[in-house]
Image: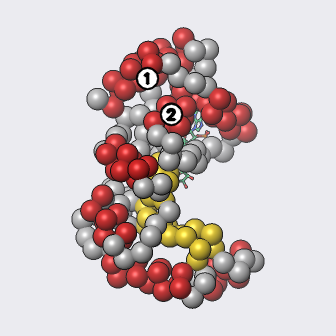
Amino acid sequence: MEENLETLGLPVLDAVNLRMGDSSGPVAESLAEAFETLVELQEQGMIRHLGLSNVLPEQVAEARAIAPIVAVQNMYNLAFRSDDALIDALARDGIAYVPFFPLGGFTPLQSEALLAVATRRDSTPTAVALAWLLQRSPNILLISGTSSAEHLRENVAGAALVLSAEDLAELDQIGG
Ligand SMILES: NC(=O)c1ccc[n+]([C@@H]2O[C@H](COP(=O)([O-])OP(=O)(O)OC[C@H]3O[C@@H](n4cnc5c(N)ncnc54)[C@H](OP(=O)(O)O)[C@@H]3O)[C@@H](O)[C@H]2O)c1
């Protein structure tokens, strides 16, 4: 941790996520020992806020019984909605939810419904997918990945797109 702070030239890290599980997703195991280590670093003043990543709802509860968290970063997008109930529960408690792979990951989401809504709204599938996430819940914060300035502009435009009830109903069928 000291090395991280030195590399970044910072006295304290604003937020640090404990990343659990593996590349296939969360694993049902205790996170207590690792989380307690981060809590100690927080108590020593090196971390302001703690978060969790790639975790199950039970692990979120386990961590919150030890110390407060400000965010959960898990895989979630229009087509992968395992965390629907978790997102709503976190929203009620004022905890942020940061979807990773918000566009589906390495191969962006493709679906007829997404294309239909994008065409009707004179937008693009990625902008619509991001707009849907922003409208899904007020606690959703977005970090979408791109290596292209053009894609970045297109994705940022999604933030201004307000989807109608008809759009949302059509898009909801993708994850259903
Ligand atoms: N905590 C974790 O465990 C975890 C795991 C995975 C990812 N993450 C984080 O989550 C964030 C997002 O993940 P991600 O970038 O892998 O997934 P993503 O945002 O779902 O998708 C990124 C992919 O979509 C493409 N894309 C982006 N905008 C596009 C557009 N307008 N049109 C066409 N293709 C477009 C990108 O290609 P181009 O480069 O060509 O635009 C890239 O291949 C990152 O900050 C990442 O570090 C966290």
Q: Which secondary structure lies at badge 1?
A: helix
Please state which amino acid type lies under the numbered disc 1: Leu
The earlier-in-sequence mark between 1 and 2 is: 2
Towards the viewer: 159 or 124: 159
Quadrant hosting ligand 1: top right
Q: Quadrant of the N terminus?
A: bottom right
Q: Which residue is mark 1?
A: 168
Please state which amino acid type lies under the numbered disc 2: Gln
Towards the viewer: 63 or 28: 63
Which residue appears at 60% of the width and 84% of the height?
45
Disc 1 to disc 2, how far (Cα)?
9 Å
Q: Given contact means CB atoms under 8 Å apart, are the residues at marks 1 and 2 in contact?
A: yes
Q: Give the percent coordinates (x, y) of residue 81.
A: 34, 40
Towards the viewer: 84 or 77: 84
Please tell me in which quadrant of the rendered image residue 42 appears. Answer: bottom right
Towards the viewer: 126 or 89: 89
Q: Which residue is mark 2?
A: 135
Left-right relation of 109 to 143: left
Which residue appears at 44% of the width and 15% of the height?
166
Q: Give the percent coordinates (x, y) of residue 24.
A: 33, 56
Q: Give the percent coordinates (x, y) of residue 148.
A: 69, 40
Check the image and report above or below for 174 versus 38. above
